[in-house]
Image (tube, helix red, strand yellow):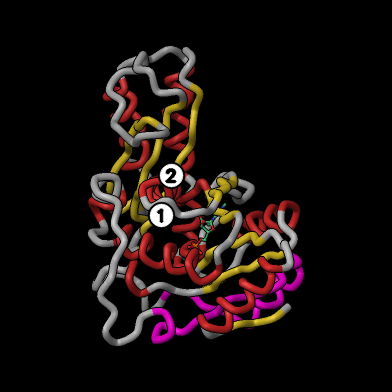
């Protein structure tokens, strides 16, 4: 496994691989790798002849009050996990390497980037799109792997590559969870023992909403109320950013169950103490 820090070197390496007919799989990450990332790398390993994991904590996608500085990092451990998972390269650029002093160009998907997490985190998806587009241009992967845990992110990236004709296939990978159901995330590290125990309520509230829909409840406002009540009555839940029912494709809000969305996305973002967590589930809309 080779570690590459310079974009120029990454570009020439990718060009060489492609000239040899290799199929390149890219797994973009911010590091502090866990089982969720590992599942993406394993799938890339199974489907591609060369696997590149990028590790870059992207300052552009963090707001000024957010956790960029304290975001967990452990490059040494990440390297050994990538090696174990069979990655061929780690692309590990510095911030200066990705954003030169006179950097002025951004990629932004309108509207989709302003709802849900985008409403609470202005500029977040612009930062995500800009860095992902840069990674695609540097690495030119055949397939790029993203987790459904960040569902809105996948929808936005798919829209960007469609609108801008970026020649890459996007693979969506299911959310990997802890035994109790909590979605694995690098940010779970911030949680105290008691916060961690209670954080599972996020997944449980999504499952509660699913259960009520499956039981035949049609009034989504009432279902949202029940889910929010459950969240609000749980210790350490300090804020609920949103609890939404959306079309899985367009991210338009669904007001009634009989609407024609193929699948319904139930997505939520909450704060446990000082830590913001997101999660979502998809359910078939065939009731
Ligand atoms: P991050 O390092 O948090 O930016 O995540 C890098 C990629 O891993 C993104 O595509 C995430 O959606 C994905 N990912 C993060 N956590 C999980 C998880 N628990 N299950 C599946 N994919 C995940």
Q: How many angstroms separate mark 2 from mark 1 (CA)?
A: 8 Å
Q: Is residue 92 magenta?
A: yes
User: Element at badge 1?
Assistant: strand
Q: In percent of the image, x 49 and y 47: which residue is there?
A: 200
Q: Quadrant of residue 59?
A: bottom left
Please give the label number shown on residue 277: 1
x, y percentage for residue 185?
A: 51, 59
Element type at mark 2: helix
Q: Quadrant of the N terminus?
A: bottom right
Q: Is 16 colored magenta in this rendering?
A: no
Q: Around disc 1, counting alpha carbons within 10 Å, would you say few (fewer than 14), some (14 to 19), or many (20 or more)? A: some
- Per the rendering, the mark at residue 210 is none
Residue displayed at 50% across by 23% down: 284
**In terms of image quadrants, where is residue 97?**
bottom left
Instruction: Determine crowd level at label 2: few under 14, some 14-19, many 20+ residues with C-alpha closer than 10 A.
Output: many
Q: Which residues are magenta?
A: 71-98
Q: Is residue 87 left or right of residue 107?
A: right
Mark 2 in CB contact with mark 1 (< 8 angstroms): yes
Q: Is residue 23 above or below residue 152?
A: below
Please name whichever residue, 103 or 205, is drawn nearer the observer in this view of the structure: 103
């Amino acid at each position: 496994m080779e570690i590459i820090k310079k974009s120029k070197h990454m570009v020439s390496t990718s060009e060489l691989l492609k000239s040899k007919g290799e199929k390149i799989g890219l797994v973009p990450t911010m590091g502090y790798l866990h089982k969720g990332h590992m599942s993406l790398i394993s799938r890339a390993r199974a489907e591609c002849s060369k696997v590149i994991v990028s590790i870059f904590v992207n300052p552009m996608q963090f707001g000024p009050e957010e956790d960029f500085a304290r975001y967990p990092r452990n490059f040494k451990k990440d390297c050994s996990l990538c090696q174990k998972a069979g990655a061929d390269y780690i692309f590990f650029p510095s911030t200066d390497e990705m954003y030169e002093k006179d950097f002025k160009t951004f990629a932004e998907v309108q509207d989709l980037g302003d709802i849900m997490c985008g409403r609470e985190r202005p500029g977040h998806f612009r930062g995500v799109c800009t860095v992902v587009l840069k990674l695609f241009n540097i690495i030119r992967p055949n397939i790029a792997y993203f987790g459904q845990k960040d569902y809105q992110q996948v929808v936005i990236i798919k829209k960007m590559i469609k609108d801008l004709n970026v020649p890459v296939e996007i693979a969506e990978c299911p959310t990997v969870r802890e035994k109790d159901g909590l979605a694995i995330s690098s940010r779970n590290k911030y949680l105290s023992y008691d916060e961690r125990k209670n954080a599972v309520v996020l997944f449980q509230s999504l499952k509660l909403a699913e259960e009520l829909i499956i039981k035949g409840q049609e009034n989504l406002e009432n279902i949202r109320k029940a889910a929010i009540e459950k969240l609000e009555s749980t210790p350490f839940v300090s804020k609920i950013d949103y609890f939404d029912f959306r079309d899985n494709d367009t991210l338009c809000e669904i007001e009634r169950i009989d609407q024609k969305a193929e699948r319904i996305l139930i997505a939520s973002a909450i704060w446990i103490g000082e830590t913001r967590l997101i999660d979502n589930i998809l359910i078939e809309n065939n009731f």
